[in-house]
Image: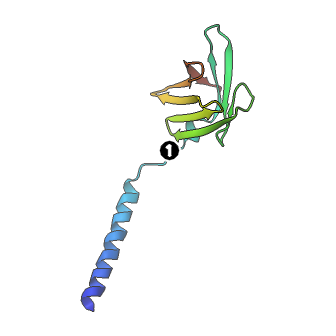
Amino acid sequence: MNKKLFLITASLATGLVGSLIIKKHKQPNLSPNDVFVGEWYYSKKNQTKVTLTITPNFELLIPGKKQPVAALTILPHRIVFLDQLGYEIVFEQKDQQFYYFDEAEDAVYEIFKHI
């Protein structure tokens, strides 16, 4: 009986210590909200300025008009939307630069955040 009690106590203690160590070393939870939410712009080849907005609940507005998209992937460095025709719209951060890829137009644009 004492042996069983010792094994149960040792098992619980090991589990508790292990979970505390894992929790201590866990990476901070990076939120895509911190990076992508807000108003962005880019310039087309003809110098036309286009405004894009990502809302806190991941709605996409181009320019100011809500787009019928679904968020497929939400990562701290990348958000992928799928439009109603099945094309991907991707927002991505590489180093300190941000990019917008529109699969339907087969075009990549560097985007800048409105301040």
Q: Position of residue 78 (x, y in %)?
A: 51, 34
Residue picked out by circle 1: 30
Q: Position of residue 24 (x, y in %)?
A: 39, 57
| Amino acid bearing label 1 | Leu
Q: What residue lies at 49% left-to-right and 48% top-to-bottom?
A: 29
Quadrant of the image occupied by residue 2: bottom left
In the visual, does 19 lie left or right of 45? left
Q: What residue lies at 59% left-to-right and 28% top-to-bottom?
A: 87
Element under disc 1 = loop
Q: What residue lies at 67% left-to-right and 15% top-to-bottom?
A: 49
Q: Quadrant of the N terminus?
A: bottom left
Quadrant of the image occupied by residue 104: top right
Q: Position of residue 26 (x, y in %)?
A: 40, 53
Quadrant of the image occupied by residue 8: bottom left
Q: Position of residue 102 (x, y in %)?
A: 58, 23
Q: Quadrant of the C terminus?
A: top right
For this orientation, the residue located farthest to the front is 85
Nearer-the-camera pick, 103 or 12: 103
Nearer-the-camera pick, 66 or 103: 103
Label 1 packing within 10 angstroms: few (<14), some (14-19), many (20+): few
For this orientation, the residue located farthest to the right is 65
For this orientation, the residue located farthest to the left is 3
For this orientation, the residue located farthest to the top is 46
In the visual, does 2 lie left or right of 47? left
In the visual, does 6 lie left or right of 78? left
Q: What residue lies at 66% left-to-right and 43% top-to-bottom?
A: 57
